[in-house]
Image (cartoon, grey):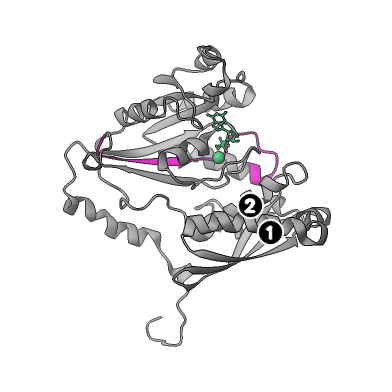
Amino acid sequence: MTDDPEEPTLAGDDWEPEELLDEDLALPAELDLPPDHRSGFVAVVGKPNVGKSTLMNAYLGQKIAIVSPKPQTTRNRLLGILTLERQRGDVADAQVIFVDTPGIHRPLHKLGEYMVEQAVRAIPDADLVLFVVDVSSPPNDEDRHIASLLQRQRELPVLLVLNKIDLVGEGQPGYAAEYQALGAFRDAIAISALQGENRDRLLEMILAHLPLGPRYYPEEQITDQQLRFMAAELVREAVMMHLRQEIPYSVAVIVDQFKERSEDMTYISATVLVERDTQKAIILGHGGEMIKRIGRDARRQIEELLGTRVFLELWVKVRKRWRADEQELRRLGYATPGRGD
Ligand code: GDP
Ligand code: MG
């Protein structure tokens, strides 16, 4: 490639996160981390809608995983990196790497299968598992299914996180006992990821279960996802927020262009893919009203993420049955690595 000066550099294709990471790994020694520095991977698992992304975002103090009242909004595995330093007043010297997983549920079609695979794969890699449940409603088959998957990983410690305690009456246990009966958990705690109750206490429990280890990522890094992907997720979130009933989760978003026009202006062009003409019409709305509103909301969120002004251009296209089409899923970035492309 170096022989040919005409050969353009394809930043998107050549970019190797692993290479960058190797250099970063040289850092801890120079940093003189204390000998009791802890680190590890914490898989956050649970059925859709129990508050996994909310919990992770709360710890990171930033929105990196999309949250919505509709289930199944988190499709890819997503790392959330929390670096703690006593020097700055944190409770420990540690790096907690949360792995947010798509909700584990029964596959209905190809995308469902992919999501389940991702969720299950996240488990054996982890040093600790947070099994998040909604304590305000009784366990169902999905909770039992996940609990049984976890039971198979015997050597892995699992903390039962009884979330949404704020929805349960003062001093009431909700369905805590029913959830505890689902397995042998190292510990259990009732929290409100949304309102903050017991969040600090849970963090202490997490830290107590992490092994001694180095800092895997530089302290300023909070996620492994590229901004481009996160921008696409924010557009998808805006679509789902506005069209709660009308559009099921058959919406995918591709960012076609992502350009820093100047220090404080980013140009983004994105395509919203739907499966049917009727869905396209709904997303566009009367005289384009709906897509304008979606675009405005998404733009605000992306501006917050990037810290620049954003010019966002949205297109809506119909791609019939994209969810069932393996090739299309791969093209959209939902492919499982190592599955033989
Ligand atoms: P995930 O699918 O498990 O990642 O769930 P999300 O984090 O996307 O949250 C699903 C919904 O539950 C959102 O509307 C959240 O605002 C809400 N939620 C999350 N945590 C809590 C909580 O502690 N209390 C209450 N009342 N709602 C919560
Ligand atoms: Mg989520």
- Quadrant of the rendering where the C terminus is positioned: bottom right
Mark 2 element type: helix
Q: Which residue is mark 1?
A: 272
Q: Which residues are magenta?
A: 92-112
Residue at 41% from the left image edge and 43% from the top image edge: 60
User: In this rendering, is residue 139 above or below 333?
Assistant: above
Q: Is residue 103 magenta?
A: yes
Looking at the picture, which amino acid does disc 1 mark? Val
Q: Are marks 1 and 2 in contact (CB under 8 Å)?
A: yes
Q: Nearer the viewer, residue 183 or 288?
A: 288
Q: Residues within 10 Å of mark 1 (few under 14, many from 20)?
A: many
Distance from the alpha carbon under mark 1 to that under mark 2: 8 Å
Does 335 sit left or right of 272 as displayed? left
Q: Give the residue pinned by disc 2.
A: 236
Measuring from the top left, give residue 232's x and y in whole percent. Answer: 58, 57
Q: Determine the image quadrant of residue 167.
A: top right
